[in-house]
Structure formats: structure tokens, C-alpha cells
Amino acid sequence: MKTITFVVLLGMVLTNCKREENTPVEPLMETVDSLAVVNAKGSFTGVGGESVSGTARIITADQKYSLVLDQFSTNNGPDLHVYLSKQATPKDFIDLGSLKSTRGTQVYEINGKPDFTEYKYALIHCQQFNHLFGSALLTDAK
């Protein structure tokens, strides 16, 4: 009886731990104002075995700030979010919202004007499992 209970419990754990893929995968090609000023930029690298690539740019257009992900690609996962962070880990961050797609060019509005000398990382993070997928160090574009 104990063996059957163990097998049933093991099956439930393995089923519940499978990787969910809730983020859209259709490539996006959002556009950016051609007069936008690039304030900072960096390249993504994957973390913890995840594959994340592309560039991140903080731009200013019409006196508004945005984070642009260019030629972006990542593994899929549940509840992926885009953060601006003070560290390469999601400890002190601004949540810019859910990742729109695992591929392509996408734009995220940044409310207000955070101090970009402090918020110098773009992160892709799974909130549901508190798992960092990738980061980009944003350095001065000048």
C-alpha cells in the first residue's frame, strides 16, 4: 500500500513540476519612433540554463521613456515579466509588465523617470516560480 501511495504522489509531483509555456511565441515587430534618443543599451545573456538573447535599449521619445527589446529571443515559461532592476537579480526592481512574446522587437513603457544610474539592468523573470531567465546590463549609449 505504501508503494502505491508513493508512486501516486511521485506522479502528481512530476506532473505539477512540468514546464508551463504561457507566453505567446508569435514574433512581434513593434516599431519605435525614428527620432527616439537611445539613453542606454545592453545585450541579454541567459541565466541558470535559460537561453535569452537580443538587446535592450532605454529610449526617450515625446518626453516618455521606454524599454525596447530588439532581436529578442528567450525560452518560454509561465508568468514571464520584464523588469528594470538595480541589480542583476530581481530584488529591487520596477515591473514593466508581462513579456509580450518570446521573440521579436517589443516596447515597454516606463512610468516616470527612474534614476537609470541605479536601475541599470533589464531582466526577464518568471514570477510564478521566482526564476530569473536572463539579464542585460544597460550602459550609457553615448
Image: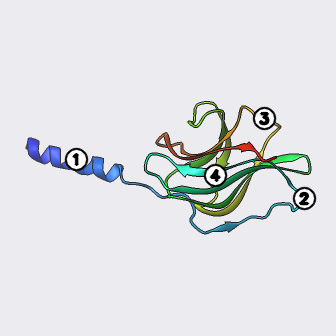
Mark 2–mark 1 contact, CB under 8 Å? no
Distance between the Cα atoms at labels 2 and 3? 21 Å
Disc 3 packing (10 Å; few <14; some 14–19; many ≥20): few
Name the disc covering residue 43, or none.
4
Q: Say which quarter of the image contains residue 33.
A: bottom right
Going from the N terminus, do you reach mark 4 or mark 2 first?
Answer: 2
Do the CB atoms of the residues marked 4 and 1 lie less than 8 Å apart? no
Please state the horizontal and vertical placement of residue 37, each as a whole percent of the image: 86, 52
What SS does tag 1 mark? helix
Residue for badge 1: 10
Label 4 is placed on what type of residue?
Ser
Q: Are marks 3 and 1 in contact (CB under 8 Å)?
A: no
Residue placed at 53% from the left, 42% from the top? Answer: 127
Amino acid on which disc 3 is placed: Pro
Mark 3–mark 4 Cα distance, whole angstroms, equals 20 Å
Q: Earlier in the sequence, mark 2 or mark 1?
A: 1
Name the disc covering residue 114, or none: 3
Q: Residue at x 64, y 58 (%)?
A: 100
| Residue 102 image offset from top left, x and y in percent | 57, 60
**Comparing labels 4 and 2, the label whose residue is closer to the camera:** 4
Tag in front: 4 or 1: 4
Name the residue that disc number 2 marks.
Answer: 35
Q: CA distance from mark 4 to mark 1?
A: 40 Å
